[in-house]
Image: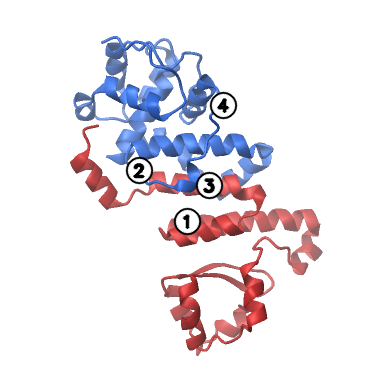
Chain colours: A blue, B red
Amino acid sequence: MVREKFSLCLVLLALSLLEDYNSPSAIQLLEKNQDEVLRAFRKDFADLFKAASTKCQNRKGETHFIGLVRRVFIFARGLEDVHQLKFDHEGIAIDNLNKLGSLVSITGLSCFRNFDLQAMLSALYKSKAITNEYIDNLDIAELISKLMTLLPIGFQSNLVR
Amino acid sequence: MRTDEIEVDDSDWGKIATTPGIYVFGKRLDGYYEVIVNESCIPWLFDHNFLFLDKAEFEFLFGHDPTQLTKIEVDVYGVWGARRRSYVRFLENAFKAIRSRRSKGLKLCLRSIAPLYLETALEWAILSNDILVIPLFISFMSHNTDRH
């Protein structure tokens, strides 16, 4: 269940970057099963070494990114790690959202607000990473509200049901 | 620890390698093992004929750098090549360590000995492992308490 909730959060955060939940990018995302959604975390030491070499050691940015992901994971009832809770409060909301979206190869310009909850729910039902039973029991407005409180990704304005 | 002193049949090496609180981190090209030891195991080590460390050597080990270059590697690969190899070896050993045991102490130790260059890679390794290897009891508790 931890992995399912974490996957749900990643899919929802990534979808929110897109204006159209039926766009090719959205469909590609929704086609991913749970293993594919979590693929970014399957890097081995050689991949990480390569990343360390090519990213010119933007340690502050990477620490911030790790902090964002760890918070989502803790929210999904995953393990805490006090060493990974540091993040830069001056980070720009849309950049933070794009960092999280990049984990599932999604980038976009939409802010994390002004949701059409029904459209989002319909899209989530199509996701192969989350079971319909899970979505049936989901209070999506509450989930979005909690993610907004937890992460510096935007300000809540109105949630249209 | 020199490999030829501890791999012999009549040593307690087998016990060491399987004792909780002791983790064999890696084998170096210069004939030494690197072993991470919880402080509480040090008396146990002394009691089992591992009296090879005098006090000065022990204090030296607390400041040990696992990516320190060995002469043999520098001679073969040059300084930059040897440096790269030592970093890759550290990350590979750290990966194995993170995957093999869920130990806060071990993670703490890895964080304290990781070179600055690899700190971020180590943190990604820890985070990824936590995400992919979720203990059953956490999943069970979540299943029984979660209202999504």
Determine the secondary structure under disc 3: helix
Residue A33 visible:
no
User: On what subunit does the disc labeled 1 rest?
Assistant: B
Q: Position of residue B65 (x, y in %)?
A: 66, 63
Question: Looking at the picture, how far across and down is residue A50, in whole percent?
Answer: 63, 43
Tag 4 residue: A90
Q: Which quadrant: the C terminus of chain B?
A: top left
- Give the mark nearest the N terminus, 1 or 3: 1
Q: Which residue is mark 1?
A: B98
Q: Residues within 10 Å of mark 1 (few under 14, many from 20)?
A: many
Left or right? Give the position of A24 relative to B95: left
**Closer to the eye: label 1 or 3:** 3
Give the number of the disc on residue B33.
none
Q: Are marks 2 and 4 on the same chain?
A: yes
Distance from the alpha carbon under mark 2 to that under mark 4: 26 Å
Q: Quadrant of the N terminus of chain B?
A: bottom right
Per the image, the residue denoted by label 2 is: A78
Left or right of B138 on screen, residue B115: right
- Nearer the observer, disc 2 or disc 4? 4
Q: Chain of mark 4?
A: A
Indicate whether B137 appears above or below B68: above
Crowd class of label 4 (few under 14; some 14 to 19; many from 20; radius 10 Å): few
* Chain under disc 3: B
Which-is-in-front pick, marks 1 and 4? 4
First in sequence, mark 2 or 4: give its number. 2
Kind of residue at disc 4? Glu
Residue at 63% across, 84% down: B54
Query: Is there a contact, CB below 8 Å, between mark 3 and mark 4?
Result: no
